[in-house]
Image (cartoon, rainbow, N blue to C red):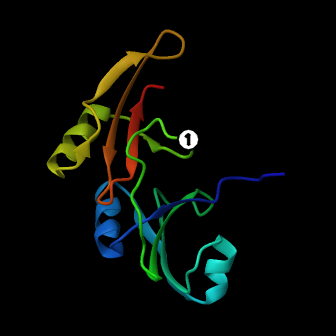
Amino acid sequence: MLDRIFHVNICVRDMERSIRFYEQIGFHKVNDFTGDDPRIGEGLGVEASKIRGVFMRIGDDPNAPVLDLVQFLDPPTQGQPYASLNNVGICRIAFAVSDIEKAYAELQKLDVEFVAPLTTIDGPGDGQASFVCFKDPDGTILELISGA
């Protein structure tokens, strides 16, 4: 029934701020569009007539999934991300990195809010896995993982 993951949506309050943040951690913008049609909201099950969407991708593979940042413009984005990681539903997005110590240091320079410090645990098999969770500018939780 399914072919591949197309995108993961993150609802944002300030698109320009979010674009800058996601570019700093390795994404690049591949599409920027405004939808000004009440059918958008109808199709999403919300009352919305205007949105801005930005597709962002890691790497150059045109078939790779995109991160779809969406800012509701009319009416504006509302609400808050999950307060903790043990809520039902999509709780975080994880990104694989080859050098997690370096990536962690780079995130510290960006002054992101960490959920907890970098952690290493026994992974599947005989290896170890390291991970760290942090928040984007709107509080959406992201994760870096290495060695899994």
Q: Dot 1 corresponds to which residue?
A: 88
State whether residue 137 is above or below residue 29. above
- In the image, is residue 47 above or below residue 137? below
Q: Quadrant of residue 35?
A: bottom right
Instruction: Count up the numbered dots.
Output: 1
Residue 88 picture location, percent across and down: 55, 41
Along the horizontal axis of the image, is 22 left or right of 30? left
Residue 97 in sight here: no
Q: Nearer the viewer, residue 62 or 31?
A: 31
Left or right? Give the position of 142 relative to 65.
left
Locate residue 41 relative to residue 108 in the image: left or right. right
Residue drawn at the location 15% of the way across and 48% of the way down? 109
**Residue 6 position by quadrant:** bottom right
Query: Could you tell me which secondary element the residue under label 1 belongs to?
Result: loop
Residue 39: tell me if it is visible: yes
Expressed as whole percent of the image width and height from the top left, the position of residue 9 reads 53, 61
Callout 1 environment at 10 Å: few (<14), some (14 to 19), or many (20+)? few
At x 57% / y 45%, what residue is drawn?
89
Disc 1 residue type?
Val
- What is the x, y in percent for residue 40? 63, 81
Dividing the picture into quadrants, the one containing residue 15 is bottom left
- Relative placement, left or right, of 45 versus 59 is right
Q: Nearer the viewer, residue 50 or 128?
A: 50
